Image (tube, coloured by chain):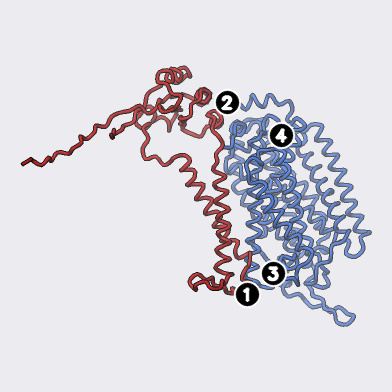
Chain colours: A red, B blue
Amino acid sequence: MTQPDLEPQTEATEPREADWAVLAEFEDVDSLLHAAQAVRDRGFTRWDCHTPFPVHHLDGAMGMRPTRLPWLVLGAGMTGALLGVFFQLYTMATEVEHLPSILQGYKMIISGKPYMSGPAYVPITFELTILLSSLTAFGGMLMMNRLPWLYNPLFKSARFRRVTDDRFFVVIRTDDPVFEDEKTIEMLKGLDAVSVEAVTETVLDED
Amino acid sequence: MSFHASAILEDAPQRTLGEWGDRLFKLGAAAGLIGLAVAGLLMGIGGEHAVQRVLYAYIVGFAFFFSIALAALLFVMVHFLAKTGTVTTYRRLGEILAGSILPFGILGVIPVLAGVSEIYHWMHPYVYEQVGDELVKHPDAIIKAKASYLNGGFFIGRMIAYVLILGGLGQMFLRISTKQDANPDPVLTQRMQARATWGTILFAICVTFFATDLIKSLDPHWFSTIFGVYYFAGGFMAFHAVLALSITRMQKRGLLTQSINKEHFHDMGKMMFAMMVFWTYIAFSQYMLIWYANVPEETVWYIRRGATTDPNHVNGWSYICLLLLFAHFFVPFLGMVSRHIKRNRGRLCFWAAWLLVIHFVDMIWLIRPELRDHHLAGGPTIPVNWVDVTALAACAVGVGGVFLAIVSRVAAQRSLVAHNDPRLSEGLAFENV
């Protein structure tokens, strides 16, 4: 007769801190732009800049590629326009033989206009174009930026709080292919950073 | 990386039109004299209805160039209201155009006021009926009812008031802004911001009534409450096209090369594009309501312009309607929608010239179909002939020449950059994201 084992089989893993990024703090726009150029030229890819306000020329200094979002929006807009025209034509100007009545359009004369009257279709077509374009622009922006993040390890840094006030930051992720612990930290220090610190992320190991 | 206004501006060797301004003045004055002389000559030799044909062509030219100057005034005021940094590098050009409203308006309304009886049907509030060989005169009840507003004296008074009010606003902004060139006091900017508030309201009222009086009252039986916006939308688009073209021309001559760059041109392109779409929106809004309601007293205006699919009413103007639909919207929409087009100087200038031409066509389409025989009110449009075409060309050159002469005289020895504007460095460093 064996005693039933009431204890869970696996032990709860302790949360532990893992290196996530290196945070460098700068005092002004010029040194930030200078540092961004240097980081860009060393071939880093997984990194970002944080500033209290939009900084002109930062995109160029970071070597950001032009966004592909406009193509998505163009496609969505054209889809919306075609959908708008199609639905209105189908519902208001067609009568198809052998189609069950539930799928038939209502061919109906409205205020003496022809079934297919262009001007009346314009508002709906326009609205659908705008609706799909703007939703795609908004959703596409979020997706391409991998947003929203519910939590960002940077919030643990006390220094990082000044990002909404008067400090500028460069963050290089440790999983960047070009990242090398000490060398990267030394490089950032060499770029007039006021401070350089490691940011950790709390992880739960699951085997 | 961050720009320093003073350093950049010190690089610029020259900031005024200088001698080139004198040459432009002479060129404009010569073109104005020749164009208007040809137009005057046509009145004499153009045969039947020649005086009216030439006057209508003149209104087209005047409405076209005046819409550009008026839009310049709103451009200046709106950017003061929004405290825009971006446009500070080229706002002075708008101020110069706005400062031209007063002299240009004073000269420009003279033919309209002198020819008011030839141009406007409401000056003759009668309907004539052909009975045998005789014309029998009946009073026109609709025009009679509007006579307290539409009468010669009040019309002339209103026209003068518009020119004085709008011209005065333009002069005021140009004067204060020029004062800042010598005295770098931000208080002057604050003063212009404060005056732009009531200035914008005054502008909206004056332009709406101006467009109604000058163009819409050509058909005193018709009404549309959106008409003033329609006129203004096309003008605002044309103004940005003029900006892009004239700055390109100036930069070829070595002016403004440091202060205006690709980013600013991109901005002008965006405004052109936006106002082109806005014009379409307004034009369609006006059309669709009238088309849907289908009330004869409203549709008559569109029927006269051939904007219909009814084969009985399709006329020569129908082709202009289609031209406006495609060349004022679909083609430039697809042509200008990409940012790469707006950031390419040559392509942007191509579209700017395109939009200027189509704005002129729009003015013709608004004005010329109203030229009818006053003795047969409600009668058909008098067909276009060589006199109209020649007169339109002559008036475009003539009024344009006068406009150019006035603008280059107003610009004269003024700096083309408001170099003491407190937001200038912001404008210089501007970048489109």
Q: Nearer the viewer's eye, disc 1 or disc 2?
A: 1
Calculate the distance from the C-alpha at mark 3 to the C-alpha at mark 2. Answer: 59 Å
x and y, in percent, of residue A47 in the image: 46, 29
- Look at the numbered discs 1 and 3 and tell me whether their residues touch, using CB distance below 8 Å: no
Q: Nearer the viewer, mark 1 or mark 3?
A: 1
Q: Are marks 4 and 3 on the same chain?
A: yes
Give the residue number, with chain letter if any, for mark 4: B416
Chain on which label 4 sits: B
Q: Chain of mark 1?
A: A
The image quarter containing residue B51 is: bottom right
Q: Which residue is mark 2?
A: B1
Q: Position of residue B165 (x, y in %)?
A: 69, 50
* Circle 2 Cα neighbour tier, 10 Å, few/some/many (<14 / 14–19 / ≥20): few
N-term mark: 4 or 3: 3
Figure quadrant of the N terminus of chain A: top left
In the rendered image, residues at marks 1 and 2 fall on the same chain: no
Q: Alpha-carbon neighbours of circle 3 within 10 Å: few (<14), some, or many (≥20)?
A: many
Amino acid under disc 4: Leu
Circle on res. B299: 3
Position of A185 with respect to B166 (left or right) is left
